[in-house]
Image: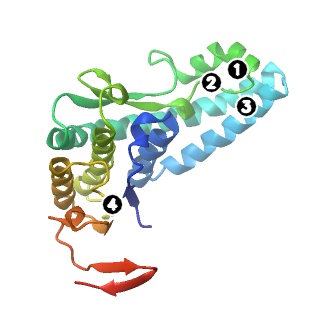
């Protein structure tokens, strides 16, 4: 009912850690613009759980194959919605990273199996390995977004502060896309924006945030973390007590 995104001091982990965070964030965006996505994702997840259970109990090929059919149908549909969303999102991401970071910054969507294969073919080809490892090794649950700077993995090229800027750019591009597609406005929660950022980068980030229509809730240890945001109400919090300042 109320789409919420958060940019906090730990947002850099979106870049440096594994695919789970990136996949979840991507799916947040797909879910809020493609209403059928949640039902398809749930269908896929149920079939995945059942196929993994069959692999662990070394069930018959007939049982495993039956769940593969459902995996293929639901998984292919999930992937199609993700691809369409990513294609629409990319221009906004590139515009925002040009303002925040500069240079050649982009992301690449990796669907979780060979790009030149149908999901059904990939599942069959992976069956022997899946039986050995007792879990499904290909499919949308293995998807990822690779962030690249000048063609190289971003996690190997940038500082902690730049990782934060890159992750923030992805979140802000999702909000910008929502505005462009006339979706209901989201709420952006911004926690201590000055953390890990120098004055110049903080100024860039706050300028981009101020340009995106969204309900904004900000917490900051320093006043400089609020500059340029057009704050409507301000509170001072001390020992759990709130005092209205503006």
Which is more foreground, mark 4 or mark 3?
4
Q: In the drawing, does residue 163 fall left or right of residue 46? A: left
Q: Which residue is mark 4?
A: 192
Mark 1 neighbour density, 10 Å: few (under 14) some (14–19) many (20 or more): some
Residue 193 x/y as whole percent? 29, 57
At mark 4, the secondary structure is: loop
Dots 1, 4 in contact, CB < 8 A: no
Q: CA distance from mark 4 to mark 3?
A: 44 Å
First in sequence, mark 1 or 4: give its number.
1
Dots 2, 1 in contact, CB < 8 A: yes
- Given residues 69 and 215, the one toward you in this image is 215
Q: CA distance from mark 2 to mark 1?
A: 6 Å
Q: Which residue is mark 3?
A: 51
Which is more foreground, mark 1 or mark 4?
4
Q: Which residue is mark 2?
A: 137
If the image is split into quadrants, where does the N terminus sit? bottom left
Q: Is residue 39 above or below residue 103?
A: below
Q: CA distance from mark 2 to mark 4?
A: 39 Å
Q: CA distance from mark 3 to mark 1?
A: 10 Å
Q: Which residue is mark 1?
A: 130
Residue 245 x/y as whole percent? 25, 84
């Amino acid at each position: 009912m109320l789409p919420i995104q958060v940019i906090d001091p730990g947002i850099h982990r979106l870049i440096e850690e594994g695919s789970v965070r990136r996949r979840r964030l991507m799916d947040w965006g797909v879910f809020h613009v493609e209403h059928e996505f949640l039902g398809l994702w749930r269908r896929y997840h149920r079939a995945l759980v059942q196929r993994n259970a069959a692999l662990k109990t070394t069930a018959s090929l007939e049982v495993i194959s039956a769940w593969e059919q459902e995996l293929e149908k639901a998984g292919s549909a999930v992937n199609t919605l993700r691809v369409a969303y990513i294609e629409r999102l990319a221009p906004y991401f590139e515009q925002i990273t040009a303002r925040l970071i500069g240079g050649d910054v982009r992301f690449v969507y990796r669907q979780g199996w060979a790009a030149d294969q149908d999901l059904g073919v990939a599942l069959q080809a992976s069956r022997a390995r899946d039986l050995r490892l007792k879990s499904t090794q290909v499919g949308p649950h293995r998807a990822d977004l690779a962030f690249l700077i000048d063609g190289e993995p971003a996690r190997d090229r940038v500082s902690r502060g730049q990782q934060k800027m890159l992750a923030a750019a992805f979140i802000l591009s999702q909000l910008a896309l929502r505005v462009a597609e006339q979706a209901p406005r989201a709420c952006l929660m911004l926690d201590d924006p000055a953390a890990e950022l120098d004055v110049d980068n903080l100024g860039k980030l706050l300028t981009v945030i101020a340009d995106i229509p969204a309900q904004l809730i900000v917490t900051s240890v320093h006043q400089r973390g609020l500059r340029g945001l057009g704050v409507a109400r301000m509170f001072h919090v001390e020992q759990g007590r709130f005092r209205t300042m503006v």
